[in-house]
């Protein structure tokens, strides 16, 4: 759960705080857990929502994107020999809104309908933001802008 939060907020201490808040909220709201999904999935949703709330407090804007201006060509390049740490470093350099959608879609497995509901944006804005995040990630991986973090 810590990793989920860290991928969204991109700051270790903030992710730790969010984890504490999430577990406290889960403990206080345990009576609302109905067993319709696994406990882990229920808790993960709390962590994701707390992390997103934290970003919103930092005034991260999830603006709607005009899909006409956002059509980006995918060059279908593949990266077969890219170091995992290099990818992690590139993801850390993405703007919060790009990193969030990339994490929710690729790593957490949410679909665009779920992401759009969580972030309060349209489905097309979620798809566009994801496409832009992928493009920006590719640019970063091609360039020399990657800084490795431990």
Image (spheres, helix red, strand yellow):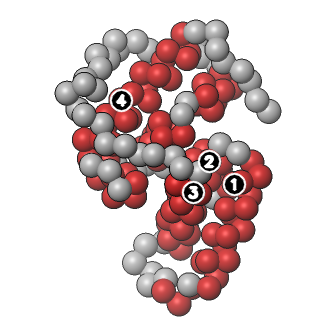
The x, y position of residue 75, in whole percent, is 34, 12
Q: Quadrant of residue 27?
A: bottom right
Q: Quadrant of residue 74?
A: top left
Q: Is residue 16 left or right of residue 73?
A: right
Q: Identify residue for label 1.
A: 15
In the orientation shown, which residue stands out farthest toward the left?
Answer: 68
For marks 2 and 1, give the CA distance.
7 Å
- Report whether residue 4 is seen: no
Marked residue nearer the N-terminal end (3 or 1): 1
Mark 4 nearby-residue class (10 Å; few <14, some 14–19, many ≥20): many
In the orientation shown, which residue stands out farthest toward the bottom?
Answer: 31
Marked residue nearer the N-terminal end (2 or 4): 2
Q: Identify residue for label 3.
A: 57
- Label 1, secondary structure: give it: helix
- Label 2, secondary structure: give it: helix
The x, y position of residue 10, in whole percent, is 65, 43
Mark 2 nearby-residue class (10 Å; few <14, some 14–19, many ≥20): many
Q: In the drawing, what numbered circle is on residue 26?
A: none
Q: Identify residue for label 2.
A: 9
On screen, residue 106 above or below 138: below
């Amino acid at each position: 759960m810590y990793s989920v939060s860290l991928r969204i907020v991109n700051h270790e201490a903030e992710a730790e705080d969010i984890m504490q808040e999430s577990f406290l909220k889960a403990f206080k709201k345990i009576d609302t857990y109905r067993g319709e999904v696994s406990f882990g999935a229920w808790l993960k949703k709390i962590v994701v929502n707390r992390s997103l709330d934290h970003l919103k407090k930092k005034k991260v804007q999830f603006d709607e994107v005009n899909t006409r201006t956002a059509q980006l060509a995918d060059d279908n390049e593949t990266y077969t020999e890219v170091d995992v740490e290099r990818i992690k470093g590139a993801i850390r350099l993405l703007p919060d809104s790009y990193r969030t959608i990339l994490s929710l879609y690729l790593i957490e497995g949410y679909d665009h309908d779920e992401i759009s509901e969580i972030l309060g944006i349209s489905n097309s804005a979620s798809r566009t933001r994801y496409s832009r995040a992928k493009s920006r990630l590719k640019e970063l991986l091609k360039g020399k802008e990657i800084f490795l973090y431990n």
